[in-house]
Image (spheres, rainbow, N blue to C red):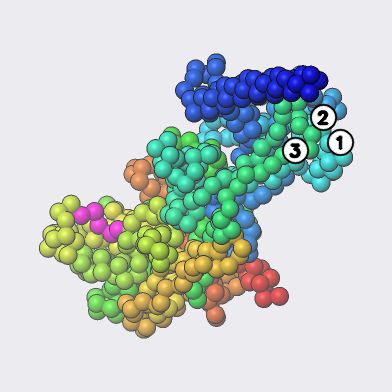
Amino acid sequence: MNKRTEMESYKERWSRIQIAGLILSCILLLYGVRLAYLQLFGGKMDSRERSVVSRSIVQREKGIVLDDGRGRIVDSKGRVLTGKHADVLVLFPVNHQSLDRNAIRMISVWLNMKEEKLVEQWTQAKEPFVASIRNSNKVGSELKKIETPLLLSASQIKDVQLQKWNGVRILPYAQPYPYRTETPHWIGYTSLLSSEEHVNSVENDSAMRTGAAGLEQSFQPLLKSIGSHTYLHYTDALQTPLKGLDVRVSRPHNPYYPLMLHTTADMKLHMAIDGVMREKGIHRGAVVVLDVQTRDIVAMVSLPRYDPQHIEPKHTDWNNQAVTALPPGSVFKLVTAAAAIETGKVSPKEKFLCTGQYGRYGLSCWHKEGHGELTLEQAFEQSCNVVFAQLGERLSAVQIQQYADKLGFTGKAGLISSDGLGHKALAHAPQEQEGRVFSYTNGDEQRTGAGTIDGGVRAQSAIGQRDVRVTPLAAANAIVTLLHHGRTGHPRLVAKATDARGHTIMEFKTEVKGEQQLLPRTTRLLQQWMRGTIEEGTGQQLRHRLWKLAGKSGTAQSEAYGTNKLHSWFVGYGPTQKPRYAVAVVSENEISKASQPHIATSVFGEVMDLLAAYEKAEQQ
C-alpha cells in the first residue's frame, strides 16, 4: 500500500513538473516572439514607440566626431597645416544631479561664460559638444561671432585629470585648419558632402568633407576620408554615467589612413612674408618664392587673409592672388626685349630718343621729361615706355605671342601630376588662371597671326598693358627659365604622400628640364640688364640689401581703367653671384601718389633679406 501510494505521489509530482515546464516554455516562447518582432519591425514604429533595440543604439551612439579622418597637409619641415591634433574639453550629456559644481565654476571661467549659461547649455544638450570660446572675426567688412574650441593648456589639463568630473573628458581634436586666418591660400578649404555623395561614401557615420578649393580640392583623391574617429560616452536611461565604461572610440581599422601630403613650402617663411606685406601696406596682392635649382614653391603668399572654416561666397578673400592673372606692366618688357633681340628687330647698340611722349595711341613715358638718348639696355634699366612701344610696333603679334609663350607668361605655370593610380589631374597650383597677351575673338586663326592686330595694340601690349595678363607664379617661373638659359619647367608644390605609418607611397618628382626656348646669349643679356636695373635704374633702392640682387619693376593700370589705381610689380632673383631664389611681388589697386614709394620693390627687398637669413639658418 505504501509502495503504491509512493508511486502515485511520484507520478503526480512529475505531472506538475511537466505542466510547469510547459507553461515556462510558453512564456519564454512568447518573449522570444516579442523580441524578434522588436528587432525586425521595431524600426518601422512611430518615433514615440521606438523599439528597445533602437533606443539602446541611439543611447550608445550618442558620441562626438573629433576627427573625420581626412588626410593631412604638412609643410617642408613637417609642420601640420591641416588636421593638427590638440587637447580639447568635451562635455557629454549627463543629468543635472551628476554635474559637479567645481566643474561648472572652473569651465565657465575658462570659456568666459556665465555659470547659468553653461549649465543651461550642458543640461539641454542632446549630443556631446566641445567646450568653445566665442570670438569676433572680421569677414570682409563684417564682424561675425565665431566659436572656436578651447585648446587646453598644460595646467588646465592637469586640473581636469585631478578632478575626474562626470561627463567631462579631455580628448584629441583634429583642428581642420590650426593656423586659421594665417592658413596659406593654396591649402584651400573643404565643404560637406551632399547627402547623395555621403550615402555613396565608405561609411555614412559622420559629416564627411570634400575639397572645394586649393590642394584640398585638387588632391581630393588622396585626402578623402575612409571613416571618422567617434568618441562614445555610456550612460544609463537617466543619463547617469556608467562606471567602468568611460569613453570608447570607434575608428576605421585600415592602418594606412589617413594619408599625408608633404609640400615644398615653409610655413615659418610664409608667416614672415605675410608680416612684411602687411607692414608695407599691401592690402591685396601676392608674393611667390621659387627655388631656382628645383623650381619648387618655397612660399606663395596671398592677401587679404581668409578663414578656411568660414568661407563667405560673396567675398573674394579666399581667392589666391598668386595664381590670379593681372596686367604686369613693365615686367612684360622681359618678353619684348627677348623677342626684339632674337628676331633682329634691334641691335644692343642702337640709340633711341625718349622725349616723354610717344606721339600716338595716347602713350607716354612714366618719366614725363623724357629719358633723352639711350640704348636698349638703358631703356630696360630705366623702364622707358617710349622705346618699348617702338619695339612693339616693329614686332608682329605672332612674335610677341611666341616669346611670351617661350618665357612661360601665357597658359598655366603650375605642375600637374599623376599619382600612378589613375588620378592624372593633380594640380599643384589649383584655380590658376591662364596668362595671355592678346584678347583673341576669332579663334585660332587670329592667334596664329592670320587676323590683324594693329600697331597701337602691339605698342600697348609691349609695355604690359592692354589685354596682357600674367600671374605672379608665372612671372617668378619666367625668372627661373631665364636663369636656366631658356629651359622651361613647371613649379612643384607637393613633394610626396605618406601613409599613417610614415611610409612614402608616392613621390611627385620635379620636372625634367624642358626644351631650350631662348638663346643663352639672350638670357645672359637679360640677366645683365636686370642687375643694371638695381645698380643704375628703377630698382636702386635695393642696392644695399644683404644680397646683391637683380630684377625688373613694373607698374600697370588696374582693370578699373581711368581711375588712379595701379598694380605695382617687382620680379627678380638673388644673390646675383649664385642665384638661389626667384621672387615675384605684386601689390594690387594702389592709390597712385607721386610721393609714394614703389611698394612692390620695397617688399621685394625685405623678402630677399628674409631669404638671406633663411638660407643662412638652413646651412647651419
Compare residues 253 and 396 and report the one nearer the observer: 253
Whole-percent x and y of residue 162? 87, 40
Q: Earlier in the sequence, mark 2 or mark 3?
A: 2
Indicate whether 529 appears above or below 136: below
Q: Amino acid at mark 3?
A: Leu
Rate crowding at label 3 as few (under 14), some (14 to 19) or many (20 or more) other CA atoms within 10 Å.
few
**Residue labelled with disc 2:** 103
**Residue labelled with disc 1:** 163
Which corner quadrant of the image does residue 340 belong to? bottom left
Q: Earlier in the sequence, mark 3 or mark 1?
A: 1
Q: Are marks 1 and 2 in contact (CB under 8 Å)?
A: yes
Q: Amino acid at mark 1?
A: Gln
Under circle 1, the secondary element is helix
The residue sitting at 56% across, 56% down in the picture is: 254
Which corner quadrant of the image does residue 520 belong to? bottom left
Q: Main secondary structure of the magenta part?
A: loop
Rate crowding at label 2 as few (under 14), some (14 to 19) or many (20 or more) other CA atoms within 10 Å.
some
**Residue labelled with disc 3:** 245
Q: Is residue 34 left or right of residue 156?
A: left
Q: Which residues are magenta?
A: 436-440
Q: Is residue 23 magenta?
A: no
Instruction: Tell me if residue 547 can be seen.
Output: yes
Under circle 2, the secondary element is helix
Task: Measure how far apart labels 1 and 2 are at the Cα level.
Answer: 8 Å
